[in-house]
Image (cartoon, rainbow, N blue to C red):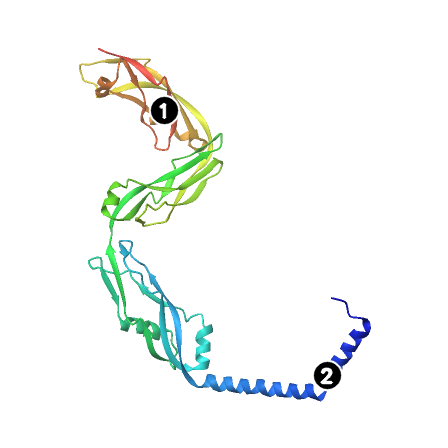
């Protein structure tokens, strides 16, 4: 496409200017003004008249008990027919309070399988958000029947799936705390009988150097429902140190006429603990015991050792040596 020459452009500008100053253009402006004014009068007259209109509003079902499962699809919208002035319908259109029907199911009976929301309840909810001048002509559905089935339930522990580790030189002051540590699972009795725990989503928290505060979603077993969707994992993290103790090996449940000797008779207990716990761990809080009744289950003349008494927060320790020989007299 060729560009217009300067002469052609000047001619177009001149003709356009002449047209907008002509009587024809002035007559067209007057005509359009009368059309716009007539349209405004017509709209004003229309909106001042009473009219009937259908309005669609959503239906929400709230506080559905965990102990039931809905067996049928429920209506999610209601169509209400109203009569009022057109200006009122404009107000309904832009009013944020003109929202929805809320059906609360918290008081549903577990001894039945049908819950009916009758016409009077729905009518009352609709009237609550209508203006006094508005007449409710009709609404559909007029009755909502909710069919459901009761579920069995079982409480199971939560198991962390994945890896949560501290950085080198750091440790968890106590064990990981899961909140809640147990959840209710709802579903078929057969599926519940085989369920032993519920797993979290896969955790990938490594090289932690500060207190842990982690939220994990729960993996919902197929066909079942959980009382909560997420759990919180927390624990304090600190730098750790070691503390060593020399402890005697003692025997419990020893008969009165029997003596036992351990070789060696004392062992070293090396504990890894957070710096804040160091002054609270004393020798009196620890004990290495062997149960005489368990010696018959120990092959040979060696017996493995463990701490029979320790603070609950002491998670990491080792005993040197791990086994001792014994002699019964």
Residue 299 placement (x, y as % from top left): 26, 15
x then y, percent, for residue 83 = 38, 81
Residue 326 x %, y %? 27, 13
- The residue pinned by badge 1 equals 283
Is disc 1 placed on a helix, strand or loop?
Answer: helix
Kindly identify which numbered label has been placed on residue 19: 2
User: Which one is nearer the viewer's eye here, 171 or 126?
Assistant: 126
Q: Residue furthest right?
A: 7
Instruction: Pick the residue in front: 104 or 136.
Output: 136
User: Residue visible at 23% across and 62% down?
Assistant: 114
Classify 10 Å Cα crowding around label 1: few (below 14), some (14-19), many (20 and above). Answer: few
Circle on res. 97: none
Residue 269 lies in what quarter of the image?
top left
Which of marks 1 and 2 precedes in the sequence?
A: 2
Whole-angstrom CA distance, mark 2 to mark 1, is 108 Å
* Rendered view: 78 above or below 161: below
Query: Is 297 left, or right, of 172 in this rendering?
Result: left
Identity of the residue drawn at 80% across and 71% down: 5
């Amino acid at each position: 496409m060729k560009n217009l020459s300067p002469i052609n452009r000047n001619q177009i500008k001149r003709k356009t200017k002449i047209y907008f100053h002509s009587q024809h253009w002035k007559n067209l402006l007057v005509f359009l003004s009368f059309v716009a004014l007539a349209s405004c009068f017509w709209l004003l007259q229309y909106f001042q008249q009473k009219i009937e209109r259908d309005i669609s509003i959503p239906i929400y079902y709230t506080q559905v008990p965990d102990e039931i499962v809905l067996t049928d699809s429920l209506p999610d919208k209601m169509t209400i027919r109203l009569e009022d002035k057109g200006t009122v319908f404009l107000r309904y259109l832009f009013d944020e309070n003109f929202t929805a029907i809320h059906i609360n199911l918290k008081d549903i009976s577990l001894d039945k399988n049908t819950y009916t929301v009758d016409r009077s309840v729905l009518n009352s909810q609709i009237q609550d958000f209508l203006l006094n001048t508005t007449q409710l002509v009709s609404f559909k559905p007029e009755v909502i029947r909710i069919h459901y089935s009761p579920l069995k339930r079982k409480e199971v522990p939560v198991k962390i799936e994945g890896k949560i580790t501290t950085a080198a030189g750091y440790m968890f002051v106590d064990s990981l705390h899961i909140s809640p540590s147990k959840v209710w699972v709802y579903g078929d009795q057969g599926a519940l009988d085989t369920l032993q725990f519920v797993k979290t989503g896969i955790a990938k928290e490594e090289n932690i150097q500060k207190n842990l505060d982690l939220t994990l979603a729960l993996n919902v077993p197929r066909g079942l429902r959980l009382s909560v969707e997420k759990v919180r994992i927390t624990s304090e993290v600190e730098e750790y140190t070691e503390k060593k103790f020399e402890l005697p090996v003692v025997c419990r449940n020893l008969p009165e006429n029997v003596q036992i000797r351990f070789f060696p008779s004392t062992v070293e207990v090396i504990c890894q603990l957070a710096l804040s716990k160091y002054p609270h761990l004393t020798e009196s809080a620890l004990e290495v015991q062997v149960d005489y009744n368990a010696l018959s289950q120990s092959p040979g003349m060696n017996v493995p050792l463990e701490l029979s008494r320790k603070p609950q927060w002491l998670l990491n320790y080792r005993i040197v040596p791990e086994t001792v020989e014994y002699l019964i007299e």
